[in-house]
Amino acid sequence: MREYHLHLPLSKEDVQQLRAGDMVYLTGPMLTGRDAAHKRLIQLLNEGKPLPVDIAGQAIYYVGPAPASPGHAVGSAGPTTSYRMDAYTPQLLRLGLNCMIGKGRRSDAVRQAMQEYGAVYLGAVGGAAALIARSIKSAEVLAYEDLGTEAIHRFTVENFPAIVLMDAHGGNIYESGPAQYREE
Amino acid sequence: MREIPVSQITEKVKALFLTAAYHIGPDVVTAMKAAADTEPSPIGKSVLCQLCENYQIARDEQVAICQDTGMAVLFIDVGQDVHFVGGDFEQAVQEGVRQAYAEGYLRKSIVDDPLFDRKNTRDNTPAILHLRIVPGDKVHFLVTAKGFGSENMSAVKMCVAADGEEGVRNFIIDTARKAGPNPCPPMIIGVGVGGTFEQAALIAKRMTARPVGSHNSDPRYAKLEADALAAINRLGIGPAGVGGKTTCLAVNIDYFPTHIAGMPVAVNICCHAARHAEGEV
């Protein structure tokens, strides 16, 4: 288990060096988006229209935060399950999205596109939402404010804790991790 | 006959959902700390430690344990000698949910039409109510705030008698295996056996709120619970699904009489952030 402290957005070298099972602490800006925002982005792409945010070289966090209480930049903000974004993800990877943060398995199409375009899939710990929120220093809405919690935000994070779930070389902790501890 | 103003119902429902959102039960905390001590996977252990720290932050700062503060589900036992006054009972319950989610900075996760519009209702209502009329003059509440990462991994199967104990056990294990990392393991699994299609699911939901470490009073069901739990923890899925021995904290099973031709089985998966609270008016 190697540990990295990395700045966002990730460079191509950062992406290439990470391996499934590494721990990373991220500092810098990340986008947020989940089901409804993805649907809108892909609709725009299919219509040949520009996106409201530039996603090339960026990281996206699949999250719908709880409302911020006084004194907090954001409410509890753990990851949502990523497979619901799978249908939309390869198109975004083709545009240069190089880092996704969520939880749970991804489709074969997503994993192939990650290798083809060079991207990593990181996991924040599902349910560690209050802990994760402490690493989010500011949050602003960039697009789709009408979607409320599902709007596209920019989070600025400091030492945001994550695990490399799937790397740009086909490594997948959801296969290699359980294989090590399975007793069937 | 005891008169209860519905405003008291609103207050109680609000208080219970706030408690559930911020405070994880001592049964779960104890089980998670024990698991963190024994988990052999270093990365799995670090996940469990993060989760234990998260419970403490949520409790200390009065913030939501998880951003998915769930769909509100209430099991309400109404004493038959109660007379509600001052308004509509169900509206009073919905108002309690509305106030908890607004004032407690909890996420509003409910959309109205599920298929076409999917427009957020913006107050986390409607809540789902399951009512029973019972003897007495009290109103008892069991409320759960059900997150959907785990709800989506749940399943119902219309088994038959010939499937037997092995069939039930295998269905529980298969459901956990298919769920893998998605429901935020370590999970708590509620199982309903018997009844009808919906009754089995209702029992399973109730069983997600039975304390971790408790057992069915029938030793045969208690053994089935223990066997399924041990088998799931041999799958290797581990905390957050990254590999390890801690995949499931509890398998809680209950049953209901059923038809001579059937044996419905419902498996309701809950994440480690099993948010529920009980109270009485």
Image (cartoon, coloured by chain):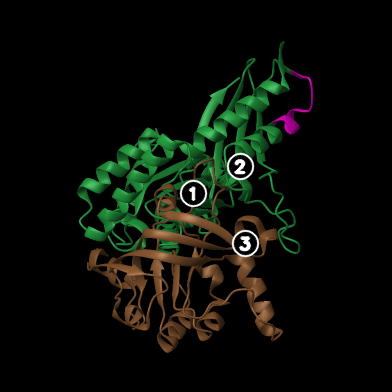
Counting from the top left corner in percent of width and height, residue A157 is at: 42, 60
Determine the secondary structure under disc 3: loop
Instruction: Tell me the residue that label 3 is attached to.
Output: A151
**Camera-side mark, 2 or 1:** 1
- Rendering quarter of residue A162: bottom left
Determine the secondary structure under disc 2: strand
Instruction: Tell me the residue that label 1 is attached to.
Output: A76
The correct choice, above or below, for B60 with respect to B69 in the image is: above
Counting from the top left corner in percent of width and height, residue A98 is at: 44, 78
Identify the residue shown where x is 40% and y is 62%.
B181
Answer with left or right where residue A57 lies relative to residue B75.
left
Chain identifier matching the brown colour in the rendered picture: A
What residue span does the magenta drawing correspond to?
B84-92
Tell me the amino acid under the disc marked 3. Ala
Answer with left or right where residue B241 lies relative to residue A38.
left
Marks 3 and 1 share the same chain: yes
Name the residue furthest bottom: A116
Q: Which mark is residue B72?
A: 2
